Amino acid sequence: MQLFAFGINHDTAPLAIREQVVFHAENLVQALRDLVDQRPVKEAAIISTCNRTEIYCANGEPHQAIDWLAGYHRLKPQYLEPYLYQLRQEQAVKHAFRVASGLDSMVLGEPQILGQFKEAVRTAEQAGTLGLLLNKLFQRTFSVAKAVRSETDIGAATVSMAAAAVRLAERIYPGIGGRGVLFIGAGEMIDLAAAHFAARSPRLITFANRTMERAQELAERFGGRAITLNDVPGQLAAHDIVVACTASPLPIIGKGLVESAIRARKHLPMLMVDLAVPRDIEAEVGRLDDVFLYTVDDLGKIAREGMEQRRNAVADAEAIIDTQVVDFMHWIATREAVPAIRALRDVAERSRRHELERALKRIARGDDPQQVVEQLSHALTNRLLHAPTRALNQADAADREQLISLLERLYQLGRKE
C-alpha cells in the first residue's frame, strides 16, 4: 500500500510562494475529485492553511500528483520544485503525526492545526476521496495528537497568532484602549483576534465582511459595529489598527486606498496586520510612511518568543510519535498480506464445501454417520496438507531447508533432532 505526502510550508517557502498554491475552501471538494479522476492517485486529502499546503495521497504516482498541483495553480512544476518536500511511507506518517501535534507549526504547539486536519478529512469524505488507508492514517493522527497534548507540555504557554497581533499593537501604541480596530473578514482567525483585542477595551471595534450577517454576529458578541467590504474605503481612516484575514484570492486593500486614509488621518500612524494567505493587503502598502504592515510570517516570529517550556516537551512528543509510526507501519504491512490471506481462506472454504457436500450425500443414502464424519475429517486434513507436503517433496535441498523453517514457524512445530 503506497502512501506519500508532498507540499510546501513556512519553513520551505516564503509567503510570496505559499500564497500561489492555496486552495480556497469552496474549491477543495472539486479539486480533490479532479486529482483522483485524473488518476495520479486513488485517495487524496488536502490541508491548505496560511502556513502550509500539503497533499496526502495513497496508491499513485508522486511525480504525477506534483504535476497536477502545479497545473491546477497554473504553475510549472520546476517553479515549485525548490520549495517542495516529498515524503513516502513512514516519513509521510511521521510528518502527519508531527504536524497535527503542533511540532511542525510556525508557533510550536499551536492547537489550530488539529482542527484544520479534521476539516481536511471532512472535505475529503465529502469529495469521496478518502479511502481505507488515508482514513486509517488520519484517525490515528488524531489519536496521536491527543496523546501528545495530554501527555506532554507541548501546548503550554502557547502564544497564538491572534495574541501575537495584540502584543504587536501594544508595542506600537501606548495602549489599545483609545484606539479604533477594524477587522476585515469573519472567520476563525478574526474571531480569535477580536476576542484578544476586545479584552483591551478599544474605543471602536468594526467588523467588515462580504456578508453582513456574519459581521453583525461578531459585532454583537464583541460590542462593535458591522459594515460591508464596500464600506471599508470610507471607514478605513477612522481606525488605528486593521486586522485582515479573508479567503479572497486578490488583495482587498490597495496602496491607493491606504494613502487616502493616511492623508485623512493627517499622517497619524496605522498598524495593519495581514493574517491572510493569499494576502489581503498589497505588499506595497508596507512601503508607505506612517504605516506598519505585518504579515502572518512576521507575527510568527513574535509568537515564537518564550518557547523554552514547549521546547523541553518536544523530546517526549517525538518519542510518542516514533512509537505510533512503528505501530502504523506494522498495520500497513499486515494490510499488504490481506490478498494472500483471503486467497488462502478461499481455497480452504472451497475444500470445506466440497467435502461437506460429499459427506451429506453419503448420510442421505444411509451410510453410518460416524464413519462419514471420520472420513470427512481425514479428507479435509489431506486436502489442506497436500500443497505444503508436495512443495516439500519437490523442493531441492536449498529450498527444502527454507520451506521446513517456514512450516515450523507457520504451524509452530518443534524440530526433532
Image (cartoon, rainbow, N blue to C red):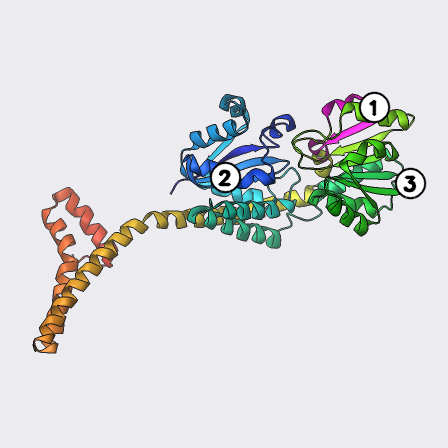
Q: On the image, numbered disc 1 is attached to which residue?
A: 259
Q: From this viewpoint, is residue 200 visible?
A: yes
Is residue 88 visible from the viewing direction of this image? Answer: no
Neighbour class for label 1 at 10 Å: few (<14), some, many (≥20)?
some
The quarter in which the C terminus is drawn is: bottom left
In the rendered image, residue 35, in percent from the top left (x then y), is placed at 46, 36
Residue appearing at x 86%, y 35% in the figure: 239
Residue 122 painted magenta: no
> How far apart in space, not on screen, are marks 1 and 3 (Cα)?
23 Å
- Amino acid type at circle 3 is Gly
Is 238 displayed left or right of 403 in the figure?
right
User: Is residue 206 positioned above or below 406 on the image?
Assistant: above
N-term-proximal mark, 2 vs 3: 2
Q: Is residue 291 magenta?
A: yes
Query: Where residue 157 sits: x, y (%)?
Result: 71, 47
Q: Is residue 11 above or below residue 162?
A: above
Q: Quadrant of residue 17?
A: top right
Question: How many discs appear?
Answer: 3
| Residue 264, image x, y percentages | 90, 27
Give the secondary structure at mark 1.
helix
Residue type for callout 1:
Glu
How busy is the neighbourhood of tag 3: few (under 14 within 10 Å), some, or many (20 plus)? some
Residue 10 placed where, x, y %?
A: 62, 32
Q: Which residues are magenta?
A: 282-299
Q: Which residue is mark 3?
A: 178
Local secondary structure at mark 2: helix
Q: Quadrant of residue 15?
A: top right
Res 32 label: 2
Side of 259 relative to 391 (left or right): right
